[in-house]
Image (spheres, grey):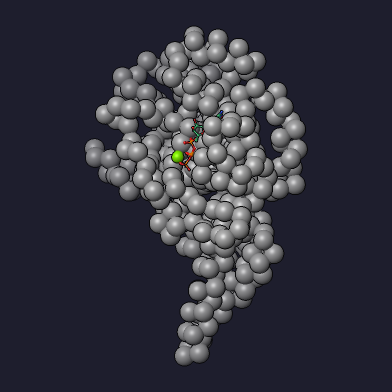
Amino acid sequence: MERSQHRVIQMKIGIVGLPLSGKTELFKALTGAEKGPGAPSPARNGQERRAVVKVPDERLERLSSLFCPMKTTPAVVEYLDFAGLQVSGEGRQGFSNQFLGTARAADALIVVVRAFTDERVPHPLKSIDPVRDLKAVETEFIISDLAIVESRMDRLAKQAKSQKNERDVRELRLLERCLAFLEEEKPLREFAFEREDELLVRGFRFLTQKPLIVAVNIDEGAISGEAEIRDLFAGRASGAGTEVLCLSARIEHEIQQLSGEEASQFLKDFGLSHSARARLIATSYRLLGLISFFTVGEDEVRAWAVPAATRAVQAAGAIHSDIERGFIRAEVVSYDDFILRESLVKCKSEGTVRLEGKDYPVSDGDIVNFRFAV
Ligand SMILES: Nc1nc2c(ncn2[C@@H]2O[C@H](COP(=O)(O)OP(=O)(O)OP(=O)(O)O)[C@@H](O)[C@H]2O)c(=O)[nH]1
Ligand SMILES: [Mg+2]
């Protein structure tokens, strides 16, 4: 059976921020990307480098230890590291079009803001002020979205002169509201789109509409002051689809390079219980609205990433288009029910395996066996 490429869902997360804020350091911590044949090429100005990251999931490990499959495959997310982003308070240079184009294609953004103090690393705005830096980046996003809204409105207005259709009129009204919203310097993430309107604007891939994680890059010694830093951002990045995480990109990167035992000792030395890496990956997963379902067997135990509320038949399509086309039923057992019994046979005899139809919304942690005929 050949895998249908177009259906494999791979979410992309862009890492952005002012120059020298620690984006690449964080990218390396997330991806373990180092020198070597598999390492991504260094990013040149305005270009991004990419790496695919396995989503850590204890449930997958547990299932794998029970089924002892030939292969265990985690869900994956792709991260993009951008270089050469220029933003400055006065005499704005703005983001390059090349960057904006790629960032627009991302499903979520991580903004790295610098809070670490290190005299050897210059700050483009000459002082350490993470809240100001976040605002500077957001302003760039707002300006970029405004430009899109304005040029689309121009086109629609011209079109309306020759012929009027209802859809265009609705879109124009909607864009007028978006424009006013952005002019108040509010991100479209906070705009309450109706379902139908959401579809109208989806294609614009507005930057200010994307889920946003603010990664505050703090000093190695400042980990204990996390609460204070969170308070700083309380008013600024507290809306829906936004999350603030404090971490030290430097520490995370170093942990990535250590063996398990060394890493635990290293964390202990800094008074940490665990690395922020897993938390960051899990947070981005959640903000993207993704859930995991599992397929299990002797050949492979695998986690699949799909948007929440995906119908069973679409979930089948994430695996293979044949399974979607020939879908008969899904046999579903929740992870928790399975783990209590540790055997599918037992689950069946105790009646915890459900038979679900095409429209069943797959839940996080479902273990699914698709019955299909082609
Ligand atoms: N002390 C300290 N230095 C850091 C930390 N994170 C990054 N740095 C240093 O800051 C400098 C810039 O880090 P990068 O990760 O290259 O920053 P960047 O945002 O990718 O920079 P550009 O790609 O040039 O925009 C490097 O010298 C890093 O070693 C940190 O948490 N603590
Ligand atoms: Mg960089």
Quadrant, the C terminus:
top left
Q: Nearer the viewer, residue 15 or 313?
A: 15
Evaluate whether residue 155 shows in this view. Answer: yes
Please provide percent x and percent y for residue 175.
Answer: 59, 71
Could you tell whether 3 is left or right of 10 in the image? Answer: left
Residue 236 location, x and y as percent? 71, 48
Residue 136 vertical placement versus 219 (above, below): below
Q: How many marks?
A: 0
- Between 136 and 370, the one lying in front of the other is 136
Direction bottom: furthest residue: 162
Residue at x 31%, y 19% (from the top left corner): 70
Q: Position of residue 119 (x, y in %)?
A: 58, 32
Q: Is residue 120 left or right of residue 74?
A: right
Residue 355 seen in render: no
Residue 117 rendering spot, x and y as whole percentages: 62, 32
As drawn, 288 above or below 115: below
**Residue at position x 55%, y 13% from top?**
266
Compared across the picture, whether 347 is left or right of 1 comes to right
245 versus 336 height, above or below: below
The residue at 57%/60% (across/down) is 91
Residue at x 24%, y 37% (from the top left corner) = 1
Q: Quadrant of residue 68?
A: top left
- Ligand number 2: quarter of image: top left
Q: Quadrant of residue 44?
A: top left
